[in-house]
Amino acid sequence: EAQVTQNPRYLITVTGKKLTVTCSQNMNHEYMSWYRQDPGLGLRQIYYSMNVEVTDKGDVPEGYKVSRKEKRNFPLILESPSPNQTSLYFCASCRYPGLSTDTQYFGPGTRLTVL
Amino acid sequence: KQEVTQIPAALSVPEGENLVLNCSFTDSAIYNLQWFRQDPGKGLTSLLLIQSSQREQTSGRLNASLDKSSGRSTLYIAASQPGDSATYLCAGLGGYQKVTFGTGTKLQVIP
């Protein structure tokens, strides 16, 4: 089954404790992206990657890191989480967004709480 | 910077009614515009994608239109059903492969 998976689905942590949220897709997609969703602000793009070893900042990259060492995986790293990073995080992928026909596929989301 | 606005933020209609959801964007240089559905606690499901060269797309009871010159897209839902209750999001793909989402319209269809 074609899908985007994220782990963990729920995470409660404390300020400053490094964490990684994993994202994996099995569709051989070139493009992967991370979003955060906050009430009243909608989904905002954190980082995106056009291909292996190619990453770029989205609208809200501060406090986050990503890496794309393999095509299928795109982990989101919070080196020193803070309470303002409490949010619902989504990973997404598509074959290549420059193709105007391409649909984005979303993971189920990771709800992160930073105390 | 692209900004995407969705009005209204919430909408409640009786079952069977036809309805229109609106999406406005400030930068007409978009490659495509997508409509998604989000159910509570769930991820996003793609409903329709309109390429920049197209004016509309249809899937079942859903019809989405795109007018780049006016910076507007609409999602028309015919004969609404309680199962259509969800939050509907539009998103534009613009330059530098950046995706900008609207804040969504929360739809409730009352039986």
Image: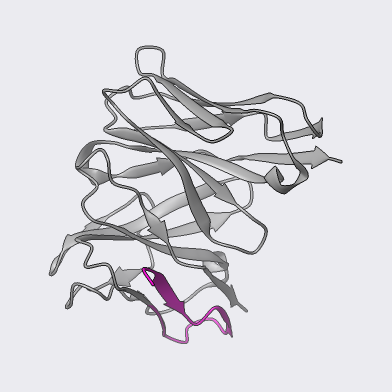
Report which quarter residue B18 is drawn in. Answer: top right
Q: Position of residue B5 (x, y in %)?
A: 53, 30
**Range of residues picked out in magenta:** A1-22
Residue A55 visible? The answer is: no
Q: Position of residue B102 (x, y in %)?
A: 51, 38
Q: Is A10 part of what is drawn in magenta?
A: yes
Report which quarter residue B82 is drawn in. Answer: top right
A98 left or right, relative to B37: left
Please name whichever residue, A48 or B65, is drawn nearer the observer in this view of the structure: B65
B85 left or right, relative to A44: right
Residue B41 visible? The answer is: yes
B79 left or right, relative to A2: right
Q: Is B58 part of what is drawn in magenta?
A: no
Q: Which residue lies at the image location 23% right of the left edge and 37% below the top edge? A: B95
The quarter of the image holding the C terminus of chain B is top right
* Rendered view: B34 above or below A93: above
Residue at the far right in the pictured view: B111
The quarter of the image holding the N terminus of chain B is top left
Q: Which residue lies at the image location 39% right of the left edge and 69% below the top edge? A: A3
Q: How many marks?
A: 0
Q: Position of residue A106 (x, y in %)?
A: 43, 60
* Rendered view: A44 above or below A32: above
Q: Which residue lies at the image location 67% right of the left edge and 58% below the top edge? A: B40
Residue at the far top in the pictured view: B69
Report which quarter residue B13 is drawn in. Answer: top right
Residue at the far left in the pictured view: A53
Please say which color scheme the image uses.
one colour
Q: Position of residue A60 (x, y in %)?
A: 39, 54
